[in-house]
Structure formats: structure tokens, C-alpha cells
Amino acid sequence: MKFINDWKIVSLLCLTLGLAPFFPEPHLWGKLKWIMGGAVGMKGIDWFDVLQHGFPFVLLIRLLILFSWNRLVKKQNKAT
């Protein structure tokens, strides 16, 4: 489970799995546009695809929140 806390691995996952295939546009971007358009015609496999390609970004957001939280806690501990 160490890999989910490693910035390098999570960043690499975002750039590869999260955005693949890259042409004509990143796959996740196309799926998000489809969802924003009402998700008309999306099937179960399409939703799974969104989860698969979006999970690295969930990990990245999680790391950003943890990093921010830890900095805030350290700042508060120094103030007391």
C-alpha cells in the first residue's frame, strides 16, 4: 500500500493510465464531456471505464488533501 502515498507513482499513473489513450483527446476527458452532456447512452462498461481512468486522479487529490492537512497541523503545532 506504500505506492498510493508515493507522489512519483501517483503522478505517473495520472499521466499514463489516467490520460491514455492520448489521441485525439484523453479518454477520461471524452468520458467526462459525455457525462456533462447528460450521459445519454452510457452503459455499465462506460461507467467502469470512467472509474478506471479516474482513479489515479482520486489518488492524487487524496495526496494533495493529506499534504495540505499535514502542513496545517504542523503549522498549528508550531504556533502553540
Image: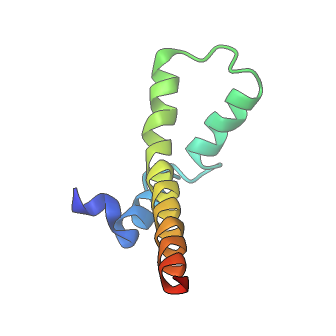
The residue located at (70%, 15%) in the rendering is 40
Name the spot of residue 66 as percent of width and height, x first. Answer: 46, 62
- Where is 42 relative to 3, above or below? above
Colour convention: rainbow
Name the spot of residue 68 as percent of width and height, x first. Answer: 54, 68
Residue 24 as seen in the image, left or right of residue 44: right
In which quadrant of the rendered view does residue 10 lie? bottom left
The residue located at (48%, 58%) in the rendering is 60
- The residue sitting at the front extreme is 80
Q: Dividing the image into 4 quarters, which one contains the N terminus?
A: bottom left
In which quadrant of the rendered view does residue 16 lie? bottom left
Q: Nearer the viewer, residue 3 or 69?
A: 69
The residue located at (47%, 32%) in the rendering is 49
- Where is 29 relative to 68, above or below? above
Residue 3 as seen in the image, left or right of residue 80: left
- The residue sitting at the bottom extreme is 78
- Where is 31 relative to 23, above or below? above
Across the whole image, how many numbered discs are drawn on residues?
Answer: 0
Q: Nearer the viewer, residue 30 or 73?
A: 73
Name the spot of residue 46 as percent of width and height, x first. Answer: 52, 25
- The residue sitting at the left extreme is 1
The residue located at (33%, 68%) in the rendering is 6
Name the spot of residue 34 as percent of width and height, x first. Answer: 69, 29
